[in-house]
Image: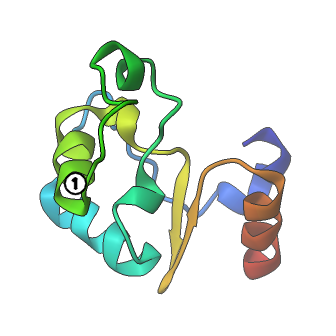
Amino acid sequence: MNELGDLLKDFEKQDIKSEAMSLEQIDQMEELSGSYESLFSTKAMKFRSRGLAGQELLEHDYRRLIQEEYTFLKRPVFIVDDLIFIGNSKKELDRLKETLN
């Protein structure tokens, strides 16, 4: 996030820990990304502690879990017009920078 610096000044930030995401927001992100699974973080501590690692999850499961527990959302998520950028991989951040420049 620090490397993006001034590029983030016009973004609206939502602290999903204190301001839960609505189902409408989750559905909008899914529509842009193509799946709820692409939004889902398997690195969340609760993924293993809830025994989800050994289960076969379906799209409606991912949607429900993201809505129930904010840590299941892969972060950060940036929405620019009709494009979505999910996670903090170098590739994804480079795509965001290119779009914003």
Q: Give the quarter of the image for residue 68.
A: top left
Three-letter amino acid code at the position of disc 1 = Arg
Residue 15 appears in the rendering = no
| Coordinates of residue 10 in the picture (x, y in percent) | 58, 64
| Coordinates of residue 60 in the picture (x, y in percent) | 17, 58
| SS at mark 1 in the image | helix
Q: Give the quarter of the image for residue 26.
A: bottom left
Q: Which residue is mark 1?
A: 63
The residue shown at (53%, 44%) is 75
28 to the left or right of 71:
left
Q: Residues within 10 Å of mark 1 (few under 14, many from 20)?
A: many
Residue 101 appears in the rendering = yes
The residue shown at (22%, 54%) is 63
101 to the left or right of 49:
right
75 to the left or right of 25:
right
Colour scheme shown: rainbow
- Tell which of 17 and 7 is nearer to you: 17
